[in-house]
Amino acid sequence: MANKVTTITADPSLRKNAETRSASFIKAVSAVVWKDLQAEFRSRELFSAMLVFSLLIILIFNFALELDIKMRQSVTAGVLWATFAFAGTLGLNRSMAIEKDRGCLDGLLLAPVDRSAIYFGKVISNLAFMLIVELIVLPVYSVLYSINLFQPGLLLVILLGSIGYVAVGTLLSAMSVQTRTRDILLPILLFPVVIPVILAAVKASSGIIEGAEWADIMMPINLLIAYDIIFTAVAFMVFDSVVEE
């Protein structure tokens, strides 16, 4: 077995083929991301819906929760992640629905590329839209609630939570977009699966905002990292079967 591995590693042709496949995969992922970004920059349909929805949620909570500073700090993590979760679900649903309605999804599936490249391309573009909305929401929330949210630890938790949410959401949106009740089906499928992400993100975010020790918040952060790795790998393996169905 060791000799076989050594032979494959030493063979220049096999190594060149592997490099070619890697370059082709990266090129396909980049093409999907670039297509989504260009389409969104022209229409602004997805981004504007997510942003307006997020700002409305923040404003509603701001007028509903007339609390003192300490109480506002205690509910900040929950309000933030409720906003991100609902806006992210809206974005994921519209992202795949637009592809389906315009007939682009069939074209992507017929393209002579690995289906996993389509998955990673959609994940990256959906994550980019979600992060842009979050970067706009954070300063607005900070002003309305008089809380500094631009802390490195909190930004790391938001990034990790967003990755896990989008990784699973992209897979499930590809599954639900084929149905007539896709707008209702996606939240029903998504929220039970991402409960660990939301709970861990809320706990870690709350600890950072309240100034807890890093030893107390490492457990939810480790859970976020493990969730991101495991479910991204699972989605990578089953995406081809999902879109075939």
Image: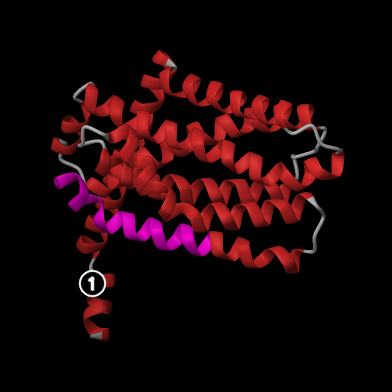
Q: Is residue 89 above or below residue 241?
A: above
Classify 10 Å Cα crowding around label 1: few (below 14), some (14-19), many (20 and above). few
**Residue at the spot 72% in from the left edge and 42% down from the top edge:** 76
**Residue at the spot 75% in from the left edge and 40% down from the top edge:** 149
**Residue at the spot 74% in from the left edge and 56% down from the top edge:** 207
Q: Quadrant of the N terminus?
A: bottom left
Q: Is residue 163 left or right of residue 121?
A: right
Q: Main secondary structure of the magenta part?
A: helix
The question of residue 200 being in magenta is answered with no
Q: Which residues are magenta?
A: 225-245
- Percent across and percent down for residue 85 are 52, 40
- Percent across and percent down for residue 17 are 22, 56
The question of residue 233 being in magenta is answered with yes
Q: Is residue 62 above or below residue 44?
A: below
For residue 73, which quarter of the picture? top right
Give amino acid for label 1.
Answer: Ile
Which of the pair 175/105 is nearer the observer?
Answer: 175
Which residue is labeled 1 in the image? 8
For residue 63, which quarter of the picture? top right
**Residue at the spot 65% in from the left edge and 40% down from the top edge:** 79
Task: Inspect this view and state whether residue 31 appears.
Answer: no
- Percent across and percent down for residue 167 are 41, 49
